[in-house]
Image (spheres, coloured by chain):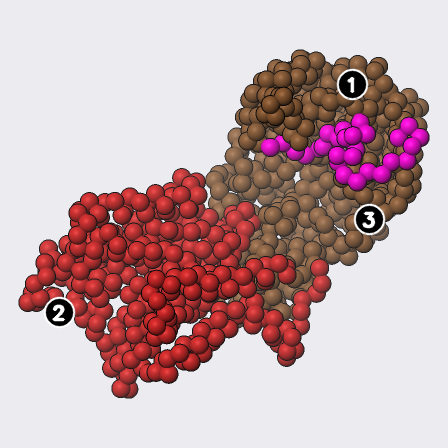
Amino acid sequence: MSEAVKPKSLDIKTLGKRLLTDYSYLVSFILIVAIAVGVNPNFFRWRNVSNIFLQSATSTGLIALGMTMVICAGQIDISVGAQVAIISGFGIEVLNATQSIWLMLLFCLVFGTFIGTFNGLLVAKGRMPAMIATLAVQTSCRAIINHFGQGGPFTVAGGIATEPYYESFRQVANGSLDILGYRLPYPMILFIVMALLFGLIMQRTKLGKHIYAIGSNEVSAGLAGVNVDATKVAVFSITGLMCGLTAWVYSSRLMAVASANAGNLFEMDAIAAVAIGGTAMSGGRGKVIGSFLGVLMFKIISNTLVAAKVPTFLTGAISGGIIIIAVLLQSMRGRRK
Amino acid sequence: MLTEMRGIVMDFGPVRAVDHVDLTVEPGEIHGLLGENGAGKSTLMNVLAGTFVPKAGDIRLNGQTVRMHNARTAMRHGIRFIHQELNLCQDLKVFENMYLAQELKTKGGLLDKQRMADNAKKVFERMRVAIDPWETVENLQTADKQLVEIARALLFECDLIIMDEPTSALSGQEIDNLFAIMRQLKQQGVSFIYISHKMPEIFEICETYTVLRDGKFVSTGNIQDVTQEQITQMMTGKALQDDTFDSRVSSAKEQVALEARDLSGDGFAHVSFALRAGEILAVTGLQSSGREQLADALFGVMPHTGEILVQGKPVKGSVRSFMRRGVAMVPRNRKERGIHNDLNILDNLSMGYFNTRMKEKIISAAKEKARYLRQKQALRIRADNPKNVISSLSGGNQQKVILGRWLETDANVLLFDNPTQGIDVGSKFEIYNLMLALAKEGKAILCFSAEFPEILKVADRCVVMYKGSISAVLDRSQMTEESLMHHSTGSVRENQHV
């Protein structure tokens, strides 16, 4: 009803309110880093910092970027963990057969995009609720890879470390670039570059605007000429592509992927990172930077809990509590509207 | 039951929807409640049925003042309200809907489904309709759903039944059956308040009437003492004419920009018309006249048969194919179909441009800003920071942003579907002036509206729809509120074969 609020007012109250609502992810991030520093005085050591990035990038970091798109579009994808499992398993087979890490990458990307597109088609053309469609795909993928792995691991070169490509594949996740004396692991670079790319797509391309538009109001979007179905398929395909990329770096870090628990709970971690990063679960609002920090926050938390010698089995409870607080902040924002 | 409402006042925020209205209904009387859209009829009835608590005024039943707290109190006093919009639970069975919240139980405390279904069946037999009480409501036709709604009211003993446009989806035979039941109940002393826009029905079934206009009481009396024309005049009042719009000259050119040939679809049939460049053609009609569906069909939202030609060439397919051919639509129900609540003003404004004219891969912030500033100036959008979400703007300014969205697509055919819905008078006039200016530039404008004063201001010609087909095409010289109401209520056509 009222005219818009004055921009750039240096009103402390408005600023505080915006910090608690629009930038809640920033507040949480700073808070968590502060706690982490308190518990672990060595937190800011480069080795620790780059390790946090490495762990993020080789687990749910890249997936959370895709998940941001999916959730902003008002959808959900719970098949990502199972996708990583099946792509990694078969990917390692491809690597062993072809002895080429690049052919393996190609396979991972194509296979991931294929699964993602299949998800998207079920949702967009099959009019299935995303939760159900991706649940079915999750179950199927997990079953298939378990069948081929017989519950056991897929191992690079059958464990023969003397194979020539073994070391080059290991370098994918464990190699690094040295810049100004800082050691930057390849996955860390990949994660940062991808986050920038996703941020650009969401803020500065037609696709990004369409994603926000259908998440906010599908009917309005259709009437404004947005291809609603194609946009839905796109977000799932891109997430599949990210699962493929993750599978590649993930298997490189582990060098052996257990079919039964590879990528276990990745979907929950990715969704939680997106949620804690301030993206509205109902769609239409959210930022890639939020999810980026959200992923890091989770790694920092688990890192800190280990340093604080919290019993391993209890760490989940603490992470759960943090998710509740972060999302409560968002729902307070919703209520004020 | 003698029902009296005295000095009822009802406010919605700053808007006074009902202003000191009186209404009296005698026992065994069928009373017609008349007025244009927004005259306050439904609000007044919601007060009587306990949905709204009035700011002032009394309700007396058989001489006793009664306080209606909620719908349940009203039901206890024997008042039943058959709503205009269907309030049925789609996934429940017919009889479950009819007994919702008043379920019959067996001695053991379980639902007595058989008895409920049997009672429902009896009511349907009285109404002479074949609806299976065990059917799920979702599977019923719209007309049958409306009949279920009516049957629900007849299921229970009651003294007053309020019917808000009960026949909008019914056929002639079903209406006759309904009227027969009403007359039968009337013999038993049941009163009715009957709201309808269809004049022939009012004159057939009602004995007395009350007319409201702009929330105020206008007149009451016996239906025999008035003519349809008199009622229409009372409903519309003296149309205030605005000089600037009165004296305007049509800018219509020879060239046809949009043509519909024998269009049929869900809710409308055999619609043909031609819209010329520079012309403003209005399409009007009451609820369920097929106006909304026709608007959707003309923008590829709704499937149809027949042909749509833009600049002489047929167009088929989705919204995007229409947009590519230079058609734009400002949709009705801005909140549900126009704006993106979560998006800021810039993105809301540019959404059409992104989908039609944008060639580059990366959106340029500077160009987005330039588009906004251009439209902000042209449409006089009042907003401080374009990065604020669109919901921070007033309704009128939101609508201007949506208009701007379509002007940025450079369309030549503009469909305006209820463009001034829920916006303030000032913005309304700005939008009217804009439409005239666009027509002068040579744009072809099709304006769907149910507001007659609006049509009189802007339209060169007006297509009037009734029950899904065109009942009249009026020139500017033939357009008056009376003639528009006359043709929208089907007075002419129905009289011919009564």
Judge whether B33 appears above or below A189 on screen. above
Is residue B396 visible from the viewing direction of this image? yes
Colour representing chain B: brown
For the residues marked 2 and 3, what is the alpha-carbon distance in whole angstroms? 77 Å
For this view, does B491 lie left or right of residue A282?
A: right
Please, which chain is the residue tagged with disc 1 on?
A: B
Other residues around mark 3 within 10 Å, as few (<14) / some (14–19) / many (≥20)? some
According to the picture, the residue beneath numbered tag 3 turns out to be: B11
Q: Which residue is mark 1?
A: B182
**Circle 2 crowding by C-alpha within 10 Å: few under 14, some 14–19, many from 20:** some
Name the chain letter of the residue that bears numbered label 3: B
Residue B493: x and y, percent?
Answer: 74, 23
Which stretch appears magenta?
B61-89
Q: Is residue A219 magenta?
A: no
Whether tag 1 and tag 3 are in contact, CB under 8 A, the answer is no
Q: In the rendered view, would you say B75 is above or below B125?
A: below
* Residue B336, position as x, y percentages in the image: 60, 48
* Residue A40 shown left or right of residue B484 in the figure: left
Residue toward you, A274 or B291? A274
Quarter location, residue A273 = bottom left
Kind of element beneath mark 3: strand
Left or right placement of residue B384 versus residue A126 in this view: right
Q: Report the side of A190 relative to A23 (left or right).
A: left
The numbered disc on residue A167 is 2
Q: Position of residue B347 (x, y in %)?
A: 55, 61
- Looking at the rendered structure, the kind of residue marked 3 is Asp
Colour of the chain lettered A: red
> Which one is in front, B33 or B371?
B33
